[in-house]
Amino acid sequence: MKKLVFITATVALIASGAVAQQADGTNAATGMVGGAATGAIIGGPIGAGVGAVVGATLGGALTPPPPEVVTYVQQQPAPPSVVVQQPIAVGKPIPETVMLTPVPDNPTYAYAVVNEQRLIVEPKSRTVVQVIN
């Protein structure tokens, strides 16, 4: 019974963020389906519900930046590359030691060059949203 109460509380907390973060719904829908499948395997029907909400939240949060942001970052002179030991991947945060340069016309995004790769980052969470090669 405690497990059910905990899972229900977790779903309620995550669901509020999931609704707020879904911009166009495509990434959220993909995340929801993947999360539900994984959750069902691990936790049965309740796990499917939790997985769907978590997947939707993560999928909605990783909406790719608009083309004008990508073009801006590609055209800017590259700041010095910072070397970090951890792997750099979309959806993962970058270390606090990496200095971010804001995108002037779209403060939702910033960029940095890490391990010789240009990254577009969501500055509040420092999460990588796109790697530009």
Image (cartoon, helix red, strand yellow):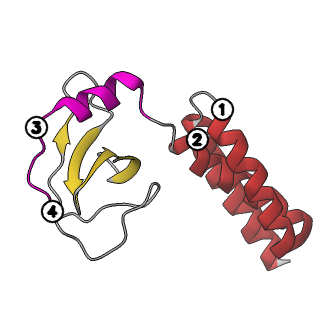
Q: CA distance from mark 1 to mark 3?
A: 33 Å
Q: Nearer the viewer, mark 4 or mark 3?
A: 3
Query: Disc 1 or 3, which lies upstream in sequence?
Result: 1
Asked if marks 2 and 1 touch (Cβ < 8 Å), the reply is yes
| Dot 2 or dot 3, earlier in sequence | 2
Q: Nearer the viewer, mark 1 or mark 3?
A: 3
Nearest the eye: 83 or 52:
83
Q: Secondary structure at mark 2?
A: helix
Give the class, few, some or many, for how many residues have Cα within 10 Å of label 3's Cα (few <14, many ≥20). Answer: few
Who's the residue at 80% across and 57% down the image? 36
What residue is at 58 percent from the left and 51 percent from the top? Answer: 58
Whether 19 is drawn above or below 91: the answer is above
Q: Earlier in the sequence, mark 2 or mark 4?
A: 2
The CA span between labels 1 and 4 is: 34 Å
**Side of 45 relative to 124 (left or right):** right
**Of all residues shown, which one is farthest toward the right?**
45
Tell me the amino acid under the disc marked 2. Gly
Report the Cα–Cα distance between label 2 and label 1.
7 Å
- The residue carrying mark 2 is 60
Q: CA distance from mark 4 to mark 3?
A: 15 Å
Residue 98's x, y, as percent? 18, 60
Q: Secondary structure at mark 3?
A: loop
- C-alpha span from label 2 to label 3: 30 Å
Q: Which residue is mark 4?
A: 82
Q: Residues within 10 Å of mark 1 (few under 14, many from 20)?
A: some
Which of the marked residues, 4 or 3, is nearer the chain's N terminus? 3
The disc label shown at residue 77, or none:
3
- Residue occupied by mark 1: 25
At label 4, which amino acid type do we have? Val
Magenta span has 59? no
Write the start and end of the magenta stretch as one range.
Answer: 65-81
